[in-house]
């Protein structure tokens, strides 16, 4: 039993890093644009399916396909931002309008995936010799170890970018106080576009890596990942970029531990209950401060 | 002006008379049944989103619970169907009261938490003991199947829903709700009990879809978790009422009629494209027609406001 719990915790933490990366992408988009990207999970599925096709056509493994998927989604993000943002900003209630727009986009992506890749579950064969490794007392699936490792690396690079570079600091400044930043002469629109592209690129990388951690892809999975991402950023604090990593780890642990003690089908319920309670009791998140701005 | 108003009423009366004799005209009345169903759903969605400004993404849960309550009560306890439908409505109200604390949240927080609540309900229903909910296969009610009678039930429910929405718009409560939607702080300063008003609207918005769910379960004679808690129900309620015009009475009706016809056509001709078209419609409506056809018309010709709203 103890081994089982240890194993659940280890794999929960590894999945947690993945959730964290999805959450960071959603969180910086929210922080800069004040928009919850309801299509986040769908963009992730799109990334995963493109990785699948790259494997079929060019025989790339999911890790190599990141090199293609990352720039592709960055560009998609830039284009989409410039296409949608001007109109959304002019609407009566930009927050709700953007939310509904992204909901529409999520439907469009799901239907495109259904049209292009059909509804059958798809999978990419693992590019490793051994499916699992013995680490101390527990067996860990190789796919989860590798994907967790790469995600950790990505999180590190993003933190360096956000905390050590000039652009990154400007992005954090926008999250802190949008009005003040535009007085300082920072081009908010341009940076928002970059952040949107980055957010989509991050979630698309996670899409490639998730094919290593969860072997089977279906078109309708996106929605639950959007909700997971939202739960993660609510846990970590909306607008606190790295809080999402903590949120992801907590969420991953809760999910995998509850699957030890409860029927597997019920484990999403625990996750949603965490989200609902968190929003009702501590909406500023585990790390977040109470916002003083209105 | 008065003349135009009379014409509008005449059209409404003729439409109602037509709807009354539909079952006599053709063998299958499914098309019109679902049109009435969607008018009911779009109108009740309008009560909470159009009048109050709260977007419940888990709106489907009221419908879903309605279908299950009727199915369970009829198949396990042999309770007469009309009573089942009433209990369905009651269950919807109870559910609304259960989730009333979430009304404290605002904007997208409310929407997403509401969505999560619907997901939890769906998983719980699908995993309940099979002797209750029939698991993932659901429940069949084939012995209760009475398409003509259930059509009339739907007709009556639709008329009541639209009537309630109409009275609500004219009433003190309706005015209070619109005040809250536009400026909550000001409304509260004027002595409006914001929480109570919102709760009343929330209960109304839950009551009708739950009863519609009960009637629909009776009409199709089958209930299963995937259909009963399908996000498409919420999506269509949003699209239909937005297309017509939120915050008006006639908007959701027109929206439901137009969009349902379009949807039905697309579904019949290109079944795979249905989801794609719905998605494009949502984006298009938000970006180019946020007030819907009625809202845009009354803005362009303010004189119409006395006639259609």
Image (cartoon, rainbow, N blue to C red):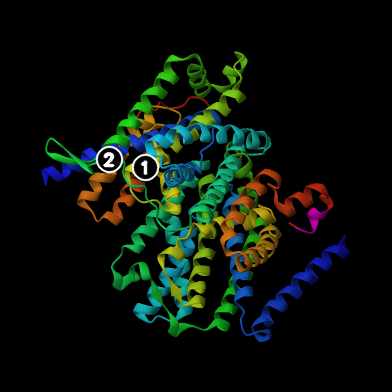
**In this view of the protein, which residue sits in the foreground, A216 or A261?**
A216
Left or right: residue B100 versus residue B172 is left
Q: Position of residue A42 (x, y in %)?
A: 48, 45
Q: Which residue is denoted by mark 1 in the rendering? A: A210
Disc 1, SS: helix
Q: Spatial distance from mark 2 to mark 1, Cα to Cα?
A: 15 Å
Residue A235 in sight from this viewpoint:
no
Residue A80 in sight from this viewpoint:
yes
Left or right: residue A32 versus residue B261 is left
Instruction: Tell me, for residue A128, which label it has, or none.
Output: 2
**Residue at mark 1: chain:** A
Give the quarter of the figure containing the C terminus of chain A.
top right
Q: Residues within 10 Å of mark 2 (few under 14, many from 20)?
A: few
**In this view of the protein, which residue sits in the foreground, A98 or B48?**
A98
Image-quadrant location for residue B70: bottom left
Q: Residue at x 39, y 41 (%)?
A: A231
Q: Residues within 10 Å of mark 1 (few under 14, many from 20)?
A: many
Start and end of the magenta stretch?
B304-308
Q: Position of residue B279 (x, y in %)?
A: 59, 52
Left or right: residue B144 versus residue B75 is right
Q: Residue at x 61, y 44 (%)?
A: B181
């Amino acid at each position: 039993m103890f081994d089982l719990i240890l194993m659940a915790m280890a794999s929960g933490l590894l999945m947690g890093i993945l959730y964290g990366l999805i959450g960071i992408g959603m969180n910086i988009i929210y922080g800069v644009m004040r928009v919850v990207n309801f299509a986040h999970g769908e963009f992730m599925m799109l990334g995963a399916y493109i990785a699948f096709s790259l494997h079929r056509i060019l025989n790339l493994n999911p890790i190599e396909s990141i090199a293609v998927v990352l720039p592709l989604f960055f560009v998609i993000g830039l284009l989409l931002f410039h296409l949608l943002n001007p109109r959304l900003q002019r609407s009566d209630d930009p927050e709700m309008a953007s939310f509904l727009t992204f909901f529409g986009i999520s439907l469009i992506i799901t239907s495109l995936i259904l049209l292009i890749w059909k509804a059958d579950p798809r999978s990419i064969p693992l590019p490793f010799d051994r499916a699992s490794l013995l680490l101390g007392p527990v067996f860990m699936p190789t796919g989860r170890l590798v994907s967790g490792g790469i995600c950790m690396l990505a999180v590190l690079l993003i933190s360096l970018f956000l905390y050590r570079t000039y652009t990154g600091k400007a992005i954090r400044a926008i999250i802190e106080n949008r009005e003040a930043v535009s007085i300082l002469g920072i081009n908010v629109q341009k940076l928002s576009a970059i952040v949107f592209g980055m957010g989509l690129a991050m979630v698309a990388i996670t899409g490639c890596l998730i094919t290593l951690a969860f072997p089977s892809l279906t078109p309708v999975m996106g929605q639950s990942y959007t909700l997971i991402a939202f739960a993660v950023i609510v846990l970590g604090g909306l607008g606190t970029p790295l809080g999402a990593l903590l949120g992801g780890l907590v969420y991953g642990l809760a999910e995998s531990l509850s699957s030890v003690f409860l029927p597997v089908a019920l484990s999403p319920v625990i996750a949603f209950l965490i989200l609902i309670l968190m929003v009702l009791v501590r909406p500023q998140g585990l790390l977040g401060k109470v916002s003083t701005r209105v | 002006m008065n003349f135009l108003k009379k014409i509008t009423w005449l059209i409404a009366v003729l439409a109602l008379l037509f709807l009354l004799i539909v079952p006599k005209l053709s063998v299958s009345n499914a098309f019109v049944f679902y049109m009435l169903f969607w008018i009911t759903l779009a109108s009740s969605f309008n009560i909470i989103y159009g009048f109050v400004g709260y977007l419940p993404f888990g709106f489907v849960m009221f419908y879903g619970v309605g279908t299950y309550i009727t199915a369970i009560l009829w198949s396990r306890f042999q309770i007469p169907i009309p009573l089942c439908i009433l209990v369905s409505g009651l269950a919807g109200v109870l559910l609304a009261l259960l989730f009333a604390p979430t009304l404290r949240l605002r904007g997208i927080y409310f929407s997403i938490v509401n969505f999560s609540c619907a997901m939890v309900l769906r998983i719980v229903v699908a995993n309940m003991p099979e002797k209750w909910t029939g698991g993932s296969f659901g429940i069949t009610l084939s012995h209760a199947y009475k398409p003509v009678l259930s059509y009339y039930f739907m007709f009556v429910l639709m008329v009541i829903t639209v009537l309630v929405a109409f009275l609500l718009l004219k009433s003190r409560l309706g005015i209070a709700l619109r005040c809250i939607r536009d400026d909550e702080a000001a409304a509260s300063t004027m002595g409006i009990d914001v929480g109570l008003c919102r709760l009343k609207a929330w209960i109304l918005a839950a009551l009708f879809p739950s009863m519609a769910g009960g009637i629909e379960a009776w009409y199709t004679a089958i209930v299963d978790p995937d259909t009963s808690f399908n996000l498409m129900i919420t999506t269509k309620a949003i699209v239909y009422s937005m297309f017509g015009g939120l915050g008006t009475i006639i908007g959701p009706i027109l929206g439901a009629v137009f969009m349902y016809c379009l949807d039905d056509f697309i579904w019949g001709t290109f079944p795979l494209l249905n989801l794609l078209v719905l998605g494009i419609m949502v984006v298009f409506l938000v970006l180019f027609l946020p007030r819907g056809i009625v809202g845009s018309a009354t803005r362009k010709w303010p004189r119409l406001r006395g006639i259609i709203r």
